Amino acid sequence: MSSSRPTGPPHHPAHETPDVVTGPEKLIAVEAHGAEPVPLDKRHGSPRQLLWTWASPQVGFATLFIGVLSVTAFGLSFWQAVAALVLGAGLGSLAHGVLSTDGPRFGVPQMVIGRLSFGHRGNAVPSAVNALVSGIGWFAVNSVGGAFALNSLTGLPPLPSLLILVVLEVVIGYVGHDLVHRFERYAFPVLCVIFLIAGVWMFKDADLAGSGAGGGFGGFMLAFSACFGFTAGWNPCASDYARYLPARTPARATALYSGLGLFASIAVVSVIGAASGTLAAPEGASPTDAFTGHLPGWLAHLTLVAIILGAMAASTLNVYSAAVSISSLALPLPNWLGRAALVAIVGAIGTAAGWASLADAGKAFENFLLVIAYWIAPWLGVVLMEHWLRALPDEALADRLQDRAFTNPAGLIALLVGVAVSVPLFSNQTVYVGWVPTHWPGVGDLTCPVGFALGALLYALLGRRDSRTTSA
């Protein structure tokens, strides 16, 4: 058993500990922990902090754009879009709540917990993919949305706007866990107030009774997949922000606050985006101007500020979790290349990706939204099935997380087969259209449900069968 794994009861009951380590000198101290278990005497916080930690990053342009796409690109009416968006956000948030409960339980990030599903070596595949997706894909997408808002607000060109934002985001992620939570907490009320006011104004003029452009079932599945992919895109980071909570934190509260924060923010903001999608965008407007162009000047400026703040809230989590995912690979890195240094490196790479997408951010985001779910759906099927089938006590499972000899090939097989079957057959992208939608365009994009089902089913058939009487 690894000596770094926390043992014994937590130092304080969950309800008696502060949300973050108190004192300014503690708040700006660079976090020392990476992927290793957080000792019990370092545990702090309460599950309610997960509400704003997961809500704040979703109150921004990226979430709005999902709703806009459901109407303008996928051809749905407003109410059809609402159904697809709420369903996608609901399922992704439900999974998020379940996975978050392992944070207090084991005190390690989500990608480390993945070793139970894939084994120590096999887990390197999803960990590396998540580092690339979070640190490059999502970091770039969210930062670019904020950069366009800063450009619209100040007239500063998009590239300098992007660079200003990423520096601030990387600094917060570099300092680490407690500053990330504190930033999300203070951003939350500002974002909520501004976006709710903008939403009320948008609904005043929106064409909610419009019939859409004939998206049908295919358009519904595209919108559902986009929203599910966006929501579930946070699932591989679920435990990253719950792992410092005391071990006795109630699992129900952890699941409720993390899932509710994610669902409420994505559902509400994406529906506001769908309402704005029923209105004609100003000619030649940037993605952010297309939304704020329907608002009066004072509210448009406030909304741009909120979009910038929301982009920072999301990108800070992206770059932090990407660094933690790399740490979970347990590579023989030099001492200086710890979690904090990895944040800076990942941020630089993500900035380059954002720079490259500035020319056509809308199309890049639309494609990315669909592709992101292609690997997450089968991964999620595997890890949720493993979660459901667990039989060993927590101490044996914690030992297994630190056991480099532990293998579980069933997880990687199920993940790879899920991707290999679902993507070629069912994907519906502008770059590539799978066999099924090529012959039956009306089915839309079924990659997510098929990939999830295959991953879960194959793991259930091939996965190891432990019992509580089995030694670790």
Image (cartoon, grey):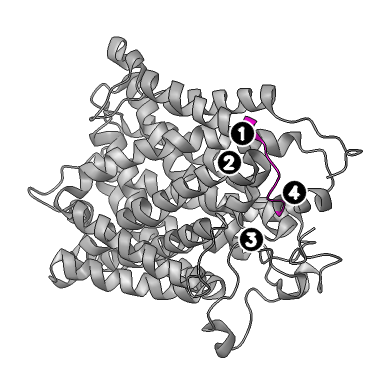
Q: Dot 1 lies on which element? A: helix
Q: Quadrant of residue 119?
A: top right
Residue that extends furthest to the right in the rendered view of this protein: 469
For mark 4, does the 10 Å Cα neighbourhood hold few (<14), some (14 to 19), or many (20 or more) residues? many
Give the distance between the C-alpha atoms of the residues marked 2 and 3, in whole angstroms: 24 Å
Give the distance between the C-alpha atoms of the residues marked 2 and 1, in whole angstroms: 8 Å
Above or below, comparing residue 390 to residue 27 in the picture: above
Determine which residue is flagged by label 2. 122
State the residue at coordinates (78%, 30%).
465
For mark 2, does the 10 Å Cα neighbourhood hold few (<14), some (14 to 19), or many (20 or more) residues? many
Give the distance between the C-alpha atoms of the residues marked 1 and 4, in whole angstroms: 15 Å
Residues at circles 3 and 1 in contact by the CB criterion of under 8 Å: no
Determine which residue is flagged by label 4. 400
Image coords of residue 401 (percent x, y):
70, 51
Q: Dot 4 lies on which element? A: helix
Determine which residue is flagged by label 1. 411
For mark 1, does the 10 Å Cα neighbourhood hold few (<14), some (14 to 19), or many (20 or more) residues? many
Image coords of residue 43 (percent x, y):
71, 71
Q: Which residues are magenta?
A: 402-410
